[in-house]
Amino acid sequence: MEFLPINREEMLQRGWEQPDFIYISGDAYVDHPSFGAAIITRMLEAHGYKVVFLSQPNWKKNEEFLQFAEPRLGFLVSSGNIDSMVNHYSVNKRRRDKDSYTDEGVMGKRPDRATIVYSKKVRELFPNSAIILGGIEASLRRLAHYDYWDDKVRPSILLDANADMVLYGMGETSIIELAEALDGGLNIKDITYIRGSVYQTKSIDALFEHEVLPTFEEIKNDKRKYAESFKIQHENHDALNATILVEPYKNCYVVQNTPSLPLSTKEMDFSYSLPYMRKFHPRYKYIPAIEEVKFSVISNRGCFGSCSFCALTAHQGRIIQSRSKDSIVNEVKRITEYDDFKGYIHDVGGPTANFYHPSCDKQLKVGTCKHKECLHPKPCPNLKVDHKDYLEILRACRKLPKIKKVFVRSGIRYDYLMHDKDDTFFKELIEHHISGQLKVAPEHVSNKVLDVMGKCNFELYDSFTKKYERLNKEAGKNQFLVPYLMSSHPGCDIHDAVELACYLKRIRHTPQQVQDFYPTPSTLSTCMYYTGLDPMTGKKVYVEKDPHEKLLQRALMQYSYPKNYDLVYEALKKANRLDLIGNNGKCLIPPPIYNNRQSQDRRAQNGKSRKR
């Protein structure tokens, strides 16, 4: 096994005068199946194509882009494993100081909107070459979208980047179909039939079944039109029942073909059997992002949880795709052969670890329901709840030689777990697969907010915590729950934030980190944030956008911090909850002391007592 060529010298060492594809990535080069770039490039290699890897090129200069000459078939352009804007900026739009996908975490090795910048540079230098965009940044911007950082609606990234095509979703099947078409002599402009692709055209006369969305000008100027367009897109994420979507612009149309079909188990096994090095390229000293995934195994894709704030539905779809037990166990065996393996598999899972099968049988025939979710607001009567096969995989992995522990660290859907009448998986999860604490995502405690989030009601989570505690005691374990919670999500006002703070007081938990809602492209929640409307119902949704009001919600989640005292006091006053200011056990903060020195001492003491 060896890495793909990363410069002209390495390409010539392989005897290549010209590559078929140049893959440009905003990440450092990590050849691990948790990195989309590795999967796409290894897939092309497996089908006989010559691929070179150009990681984090200096976009202000031409030399690195020119070193390989023009590729025979085209350029593949991606921002990397993560959206470059999310990578660079916090939800407060402050510049981050670390990039986990860059050598030693150095910030600044990729540009803002990396996909667009790289694509424009390629178009400048190679005006006649095919440019295909992919990855999460392009996938979720394939049609017009609200951009949080610019606070405006931007057109399809295809037009912004002056590219020829977007391949959205995971891309294994669509990239090979595209490569074969280009290799067969077709011009990129004539390749308009590939599932999971987006292209622009001057005429849609040749299209048969399709749906025309509101125009770009309409959705840019009318939030109800934006919501209407989003609803249509949201209802066409399923490969088996989606239709072709057309978005009109002044001088062209952007056409989104139907999504790629879900991978079969055989296809997915093949994808993860390719000769990955499972490490970063030796040119680097250390890539922080490898830490959690190096000894982790992906078992599935897709998610039928459909949380409003998550883009998985738009990217991977709701139909679960899974690898076989043998494929997963064989990968774990390979991991145990690495010199630096210490006996611990960090994770066997996916977007949702305990989703191993489609939620119901009919999905593989007719697709997922357009107007009904599998788990929200209540589980569908057709929902299949079964952990047996996933549990068998975990059992097989933990029996292997050299294995000390197999952890499950990717998300567990506690609601799905609670719907399982058989406690065997729950008990073995606690007994064998938790490293002292289990991270779960209730997200909030207000049922009003949870409904907007597309999450189950809080009562189910409360039941889960009690059952988790009971099963831990029965197993002789002392393992904790770490809840992920979110502030300022659409639908959440100051009263809901106070309710959350009171819950945290009751369970004696102070989150070390607080996640404000981050409006990223193509999520239902982002549509609500921008429009103030629930696109599925057309009803108004409360949205907190004022930075100070959002700060109040955030401070309430860390009410015991002395530095937050004034903000929490203001928030409680605003919510008309002065009953929570006092010295009894139900109060969040003590009464104010007006002498500054006394006030500081009191707050410091309060912070110490809370931490105890």
Image (cartoon, grey):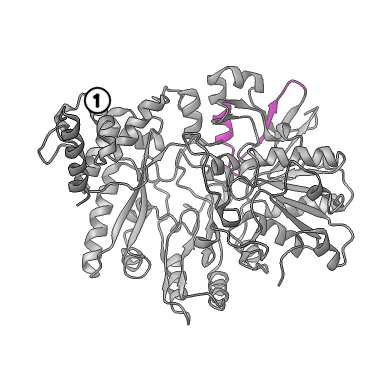
Residue in view at x 63 percent, y 36 percent = 141
Q: Is residue 298 above or below residue 199?
A: below
Q: Mark 1 sits on what residue?
A: 575
Residue 64 magenta-highlighted: no
**Amino acid of disc 1:** Ala
Residue in view at x 58 percent, y 53 percent = 101
- Seen from the viewer's position, the closer of residues 5 and 146 is 5
User: Residue 419 at what x, y percent from top left?
Assistant: 34, 53
Find numbered disc 1 in the image and state the secondary structure of the residue it sits on.
Answer: loop
User: Residue 338 at what x, y percent from top left?
Assistant: 57, 76
- Seen from the viewer's position, the closer of residues 287 and 407 is 287
User: Residue 500 at what x, y percent from top left?
Assistant: 27, 38
User: Where, by quadrant of the figure, is residue 29 drawn?
Assistant: bottom right
In the orientation shown, which residue stands out farthest toward the front? 597
Residue in view at x 25 percent, y 39 percent = 562
- Seen from the viewer's position, the closer of residues 101 and 225 is 101
Q: Is residue 320 above or below residue 187?
A: below
Horizontal side, residue 329 vs residue 274: left or right: left
What is the magenta range? Answer: 228-251
Horizontal side, residue 287 vs residue 605: left or right: right
